[in-house]
Image (cartoon, rainbow, N blue to C red):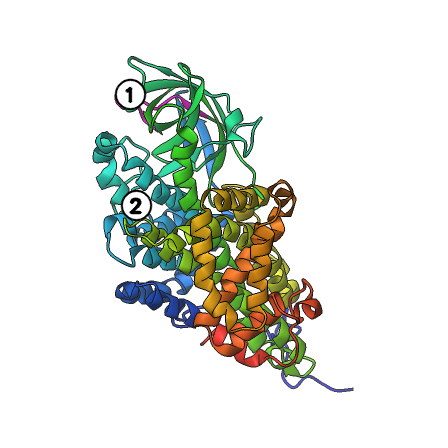
Amino acid sequence: MTTPSRPQRFGETHEVVNQTPPLASYDMLAADPALTAAIEREGAGWHAEALERDGRALTQPDVLALADLANRHEPELSTHSPRGERIDAIEFHTAWHELLALLRREGLHALPFETPRPGAMPARCAGYFLHGQLESGSLCPITMTFASIPVLQKEPALYATLRHALLSREHDPRDIPLSAGKRSMMVGMGMTEKQGGSDVRSNQTRAYPIDTPGRGTAYRLIGHKWFFSAPQCDAHLVLARACESDAISCFYVPRFTPDGRKNAVQVQRLKEKLGNRSNASSEVEFLDAYGVMIGDEGRGVPTIIEMANYTRLDCVIGSAALMRAALVQAIHHARHRSVFGAKLVDQPLMRNVLADLALESEAATVLFMRLAGAFETSAAADGAPEERAWRRLVTPAAKFWVCKRALEFTGEAMEVWGGNGYVETGPMGRFYREAPVNSIWEGSGNVMCLDVLRAFERETDAAHALFASWQETAREHPALGPALDALLQTLKGDPATREASARRIAQQLVLTAQAVLLAKHAPEEVADAFIETRLGDARGETGRVYGTLPARFDHAGVVRRAFAV
């Protein structure tokens, strides 16, 4: 019988060993060579110093703790004051407000509009991607505020009264009217009703003119919204039927009326959600709520779709950020955890899984950064047709595909952690719960795939210009050329049968786009492995499960590149 080498303390039965230390205090940007290169490539190098500073700040232990606190202490609704007044106040943990303060400080709610210079959109999207690796719920009101600005700018008189508060880099959490001195504002949106979901043309909410009807005039709204994102926002863009024409129009609905009273937008309850718990989503009713028509009467859907196009790009970025966050946690764990006598990262099968995840993450990163550049360049008067196609055709396909991939991706990364990944003391469970929302928000998968077909039909010349720009790269790779040809043949097929194949078309479009970008900008071992396993002969060997890369690829090298710390 052996005796302990040292006396055991009371309550101590063992020594804690072989547990992975928390991942903290590293340079988030420097550790991501794919993002660093894309920032320079898309003309945002002038913002690199700010991104580097932010990337270091976001990994500090006190900042990492904010994400956990904001999600454990969920927002609470108080419908009435102690005196019985209707207030519909949303109370958040202080961590939520600190997260929003960080986001606004970096200008992620308005950078391209505040600093309109080449590369501003990619600079903003890169920063959004960094913050998305920290916490997802706080991104929602920032995204909607950002996306509302180009819509509101088309209403000069209204925008002039809001500009300072919209662009402000200060987060002002006070629930008071702008006229009472509030220093900044957030804007949400309200489209979905019970009976319609994505079919907003079935909306029933009605708007009645207070005096003269038409654009820029005041209305009173009666109806409801089934999903009303971030009800604490200072205003929302809302769809309703203008009573004169019964046509869907768009309205600016502030939280407070011009005379300073709380607007008659009553919050019925907050949604109990799977994820995105730090953020408040709600059901509301409009009881003669004050609103101002923006855009032309009957053009509500096109007006708010401009806002949705920006939010869809943020869905792609947010999902890519979840993938990146889960990947670095998985690699970090594998570098520290020993199993069966060796570090996980040195075991061939685990290296295969990590390398496959790394390929997927890098492909998502180069794609969203290219889309960010296209959003900027396509808006220019001399924007090339292929830039318009990147924005109009590839964005909905990317929204479909990258958001879908994040679901499987975060589950696989959680499995790398084993049981520790399935408990709430680490971040992996939160990443997994967050993953589904971007597939649903701003148009589910089927809606996005049908939008790809509509974009191709309406922007055929731009689409063909895009495909032509891919041809030179495609010819240089034996798998990429045939994949592009197959995509073109499918798109040229019978329009009556294309709809049933819309998901396959969107998938092939995104994979081809990612393959072209990696072939042009990634190391050869990364590009070849991605193209061969997603589009080439090795596709049959890999199937749909991560960790099935053929042995001929340099798994260890791909993993080292993915998280360069």
Residue at position x 41%, y 29% from top?
300
User: Mark 1 and mark 2: span between their CA atoms?
Assistant: 29 Å
Residue 297 seen in the current view: yes
In the displayed structure image, the side of residue 441 where residue 498 appears, left or right: right
Q: Quadrant of the image for the N terminus?
A: bottom right
Foreground of the two, 24 or 416: 416
Tell which residue pokes out farthest to the right in this image. 1
Say which element carries label 1: loop
- Mark 2 — residue? 171
Say which element carries label 2: loop
Residue at position x 56%, y 77% from top?
335
Q: Is residue 454 magenta?
A: no
Q: Is residue 264 magenta?
A: yes
Principal secondary structure, stretch drawn in magenta: loop
- Mark 1 — residue? 217
Residue at position x 52%, y 74% from top?
526
In the displayed structure image, the side of residue 218 where residue 368 appears, left or right: right
Q: Quadrant of the image for the C terminus?
A: bottom left
Q: Given the image, on which type of amino acid does mark 2 rest?
A: His
Q: Given the image, on which type of amino acid does mark 1 rest?
A: Thr
118 vs 263: above or below: below
Q: Position of residue 401 (x, y in %)?
A: 56, 54
